[in-house]
Image: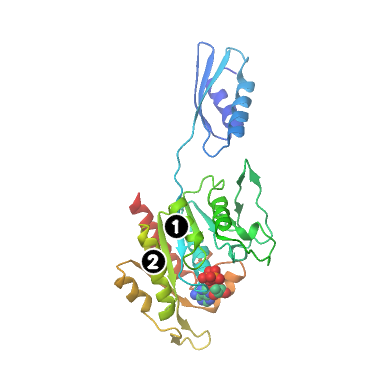
Amino acid sequence: MTELSVIFDRLSTLSNGRASAPRLRDGVLSLVLDVTDLGQAERDALAAAITAEFKGQPEIEDVRIAQTAEKRSLRIIAVASGKGGVGKSTVSANLAIALHRRGVRVGLVDADIYGPSQPRLMATEGAKPQAEEKQLVPILSGVGIPMLSMGHLVEPGQAIAWRGPMAASALGQLVDAKWGAVDVLVVDMPPGTGDVQLSMIQKHKPAGVIIVSTPQDLALIDATRAVNLFDQAHVPMIGLVENMAGYICPHCGEVSDPFGSGGAQAAASQMEMPFLGRIPLSIGIRTASDAGMPPAAEDGLDGAPFLAIARKVADWLAAQG
Ligand SMILES: Nc1ncnc2c1ncn2[C@@H]1O[C@H](COP(=O)(O)OP(=O)(O)OP(=O)(O)O)[C@@H](O)[C@H]1O
């Protein structure tokens, strides 16, 4: 039992790999226990289990445990738009998947509290998150991304008629959940510039924001409003995504631009913000996303623009350190 390697093996199993640096000197077994993301009750229970396992074993009179918690800062990427229906949820889901495929430890929050659509996009409809020590535990989607949505907390189709402060507190529950080993949280914001946006900016301090717009003038005017809101609060602009940019006819392959083209890129350069890319209007993107299999999960044509945008976002994240 007193062989350190035997102790270490036993410790690793017992602590799920959280224990390290065991030492045995003068009858005292000392070790370091990484308690990152564990609540107080879990920390105490784990320390007690280790003590109970080793104290009183041959040559071990006492057990001393130094608990350490890595101070992890979760970086939030807010995906916002000035108006509804421009594809913000589609971009958020595909971006999260594409970042995940690049090895980023990513989580997804559906802060579109009034019209949550991520459970459908990520095929987690009907799942109910558990709470541990007053914190929600995210649901693991089929593609391996932990996520939380207001849609998981209310019955499907149930209208959420909340006032601003309630919506802001719901956002807090989703963001301050038990994200565990997540470094980057993609947050699908509700459209517009209301209470949830203000709460996100003031309370949760996003590392950066991505604005999604369609090429129409009207959407761009709205997008400018969203840009101004985040700009005034000094939230770094990651860039603008132009969605539904050109239509490729599935029959003849002809490309048409039902909403015009190039408007978003021009607007981005006018506002001196990076342009992240253009996503075409494609039936494949709609059917796959609505069926809970966002195209970024695969290498097809429909996924490619999202993967290219994710590369730029990953570069941005890396440049921020
Ligand atoms: N590039 C695209 N090609 C085809 N359909 C798209 C594309 N982007 C989004 N859609 C479709 O448009 C609809 C609206 O998209 P989505 O829900 O992502 O928008 P939103 O901005 O999040 O809307 P809301 O404001 O309601 O939250 C969905 O049916 C989606 O599948």
Q: Secondary structure at mark 2?
A: helix
Figure check: 304 above or below 8 = below
Q: Is residue 72 something that shows in the picture?
A: yes
Quarter residue 44 falls in: top right
Residue drawn at x 58%, y 32% as measured from the top left: 43
Q: Amino acid at mark 2?
A: Val
Where is mark 1, residue-wise?
77
Q: Please provide percent x and percent y for residue 294.
A: 55, 67
Quadrant of the rendering where the N terminus is positioned: top right
104 left or right of 112? left
Between residues 109 and 7, which one lies in front from this camera angle? 109
Q: Earlier in the sequence, mark 1 or mark 2?
A: 1
- Of badges 1 and 2, the one in the foreground is 2
Where is mark 2, residue-wise?
227
Q: Please provide percent x and percent y for residue 73.
A: 44, 45
Q: Is residue 285 something that shows in the picture?
A: no
Q: Please provide percent x and percent y for residue 296.
A: 51, 66
Between residues 154 and 181, which one lies in front from this camera angle? 154
**How far apart are the alpha carbons under marks 1 and 2?**
14 Å
276 left or right of 187? left
Q: Amino acid at mark 1?
A: Ile
Residue drawn at x 29%, y 68% as measured from the top left: 272
